[in-house]
Image (cartoon, grey):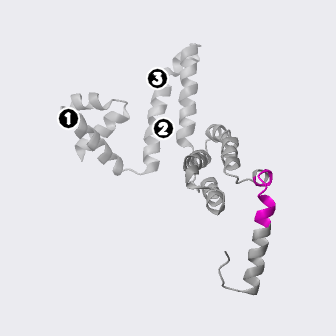
Amino acid sequence: MQLAARVLNLRRAGAQFDTIAERLNLPENLVRELFDQALTTIDQDVRRALEVDRLDRLHMAVWQAAAAGDLAAVDRVLKISERREKVLNDPRDNDHALRDAFDASVHTSTQVQDVDSALVEAGRKIADRVDAAVASGDGYETTKALYLVPHMVNVLRELLATPASRHNAGLAGKAAKESKLAQLRSVHHPGQQTG
């Protein structure tokens, strides 16, 4: 375990795996295993603290040059600050709300066929990306991901899963009539399957 701690400390300092392997006279694959082993002993908050500590050290290394007016150093300080903000940002649990809603639309649609599987998968990827960005809590990433929503609406439109697309295809009135008929049948014959 002491060796794993040494690997973790060297990695924390920014050393690459091949450099650590050379320094400790170990095979690189063993160094990676030891690093993974060391990570399992610390929780997410500690991992976050390690990354913030690393960023603070980098910040200190360029701060004097930035304060003296070195524009490249100023740029580095700003980038480090942005990275620190992302690391400290608490991600929320991904509720997969958009993906669940998309899947519900596809599942309940009578128009989606097996031949539409690529289109359905494209919609799922878009929904997953938006859900992940929202869960990240990162405003910039969320804003970027929300630009994908019109693309998902286009997917839904192609699948005839929007009110306007069903109306334009002449399906809106038919679906409403079938729904009313199913309701009436269930009232007159409770428990009987409608077909």
Q: Nearer the viewer, mark 1 or mark 3?
A: 1
Q: What is the crowding at mark 1: few (fewer than 14 residues within 10 Å), some, or many (at least 20)?
A: few
Q: What is the crowding at mark 2: few (fewer than 14 residues within 10 Å), some, or many (at least 20)?
A: many
* 107 vs 36: above or below: below
Q: Amino acid at mark 1?
A: Pro
Q: Amino acid at mark 2?
A: Val
Residues under numbered marks 2 and 1 in contact, where contact means CB atoms less than 8 Å apart: no
> Which residue is labeled 1 in the image?
27
> Which residue is labeled 3 in the image?
61
In the rendered image, residue 67 lying in the magenta stretch gets the answer no
* 28 vs 102: above or below: above
Is 36 left, or right, of 194 in this rendering? left
Q: Amino acid at mark 3?
A: Ala
Residue 90: x and y in percent read 56, 48
Under circle 1, the secondary element is: loop
Count the numbered circles shown. Answer: 3
> Which residue is labeled 2 in the image?
52
Is 10 left, or right, of 163 in this rendering? left
Task: State how far apart marks 2 and 1 are (Cα).
Answer: 29 Å
Residue appearing at x 58%, y 19% in the figure:
74
Under circle 2, the secondary element is: helix
Extreme-left residue of the structure: 25
Which region shows up in magenta?
166-176
* Predominant secondary structure, magenta span: helix
Task: State how far apart marks 2 and 3 are (Cα).
Answer: 14 Å
